[in-house]
Image (spheres, rainbow, N blue to C red):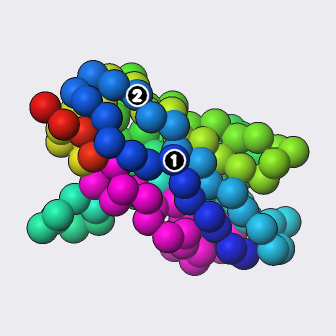
């Protein structure tokens, strides 16, 4: 499975961005998709996950109510709509996917930079 993330950029405080994560290869093996982020000098943190069927979204408390994850079955793409962005959301965002064995995310896309200016 290969993951391609895109959609990052520079936005002002309160603005919005939509990230995309497109899967290719043996996508039938994907059970869930997630977004993680890593800010400068900090550890990578979980943002949100979703089953590949589009059910059971789970959000980190820091983004709940502002971010929305969704899936486009036809495009094998997961989206992360980010609204009301704050400077503390600034980070490199990574999409990841896993199969249904355990909870480790096996496949990772390259990061996409999100910068929120105050």
Q: Height in image: 3 above or below 68?
A: below
Q: Quadrant of the N terminus?
A: bottom right
Label 2: element kind: loop
Residue range of the region highlighted in magenta in the rendering: 91-114
- Which residue is rendered at x = 61% and y = 54% of the image? 21
The residue identified by callout 1 is: 7
Indicate the quadrant where residue 6 lies: bottom right
Q: Quadrant of the C terminus?
A: top left
Left or right: 71 as drawn, with respect to 81? right
Q: Height in image: 103 above or below 45?
A: below
Tag 1: Cα neighbours inside 10 Å, few (<14), some, or many (≥20)? some
Label 1: element kind: loop
Tag 2: Cα neighbours inside 10 Å, few (<14), some, or many (≥20)? some
Q: Give whichever of 51, 11 is nearer the camera.
A: 11
- Which residue is rendered at x = 77% and y = 68% of the image? 24
Q: Give whichever of 15, 30 is nearer the camera.
A: 15
The residue identified by callout 2 is: 16
- Which residue is rendered at x = 22% and y = 27% of the image? 13
Looking at marks 1 and 2 on the same chain, the residue that comes earlier in the sequence is marked by 1
Q: CA distance from mark 1 to mark 2?
A: 11 Å
- Which residue is rendered at x = 18% and y = 42% of the image? 88
Where does the image place residue 64, in percent across and percent down from the top left? Answer: 37, 30
Q: Are marks 1 and 2 in contact (CB under 8 Å)?
A: no
Q: Height in image: 68 above or below 27?
A: above
Magenta span has 35?
A: no
Left or right: 59 as drawn, with respect to 100? left
Magenta span has 113?
A: yes
Where does the image place residue 23, in percent across and percent down from the top left? Answer: 72, 62
């Amino acid at each position: 499975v290969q993951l391609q993330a895109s959609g990052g950029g520079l936005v002002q405080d309160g603005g919005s961005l939509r990230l995309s994560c497109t899967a290719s290869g043996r996508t039938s093996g994907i059970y869930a998709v997630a977004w993680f982020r890593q800010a400068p000098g900090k550890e990578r943190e979980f943002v949100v996950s979703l089953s590949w069927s589009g059910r059971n979204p789970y959000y980190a408390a820091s983004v709940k109510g502002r971010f929305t994850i969704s899936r486009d079955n036809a495009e094998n793409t997961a989206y992360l709509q980010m609204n009301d962005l704050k400077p503390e959301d600034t980070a490199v965002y990574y999409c990841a996917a896993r199969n249904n064995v355990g909870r480790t995310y096996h496949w990772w896309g390259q990061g996409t930079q999100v910068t929120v200016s105050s």
